[in-house]
Image (spheres, helix red, strand yellow):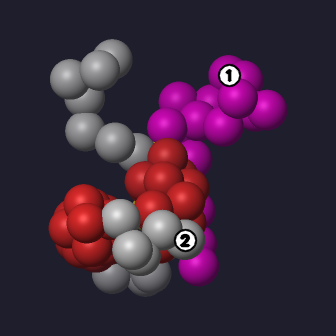
């Protein structure tokens, strides 16, 4: 849903794209917001709880570890 907060996987992919455009004025702010979003959602073990991957139907939640 558009009003839901971004999941860690989507945020990470967006961060990669935004970080490649450092000369765009809004990129610096977007990069900082994305990093904060990821850090706030990171679990103590370093992983993240995220929406299920499209390639793995039937799982309600997935855990991603870095």
State whether residue 3 is above or below residue 44: above
Q: Main secondary structure of the magenta part?
A: loop
- Name the residue rendered at 44%, 81% in the picture: 46
Visible residue check, residue 45: yes
- Label 1: how many residues lie within 10 Å, few (<14), some (14-19) or many (20+)? few
Residue at horizontal 43%, vertical 82%?
45
Residue at numbered disc 1: 58
Q: Which mark is residue 20?
A: 2
Quarter of the figure with the C terminus: bottom right
Q: Is residue 40 left or right of residue 46?
A: left
Frontmost residue, 39 versus 63:
39
Foreground tag (1 vs 2): 2
Rendered location of residue 36, percent (x, y):
22, 71
Q: Position of residue 3 (x, y in %)?
A: 20, 23
Tell me the element at label 1.
Answer: loop
Front-lying residue, 18 or 9: 18
Q: Which residues are magenta?
A: 51-66
Q: Earlier in the sequence, mark 1 or mark 2?
A: 2
């Amino acid at each position: 849903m558009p009003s839901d907060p971004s999941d860690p996987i989507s945020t990470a992919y967006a961060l990669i794209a935004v970080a490649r455009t450092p000369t765009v004025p809004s990129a610096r702010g977007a990069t900082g917001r994305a990093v904060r979003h990821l850090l706030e959602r990171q679990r103590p073990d370093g992983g993240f709880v995220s929406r299920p991957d499209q390639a793995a139907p039937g799982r309600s939640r997935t855990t991603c570890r870095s």
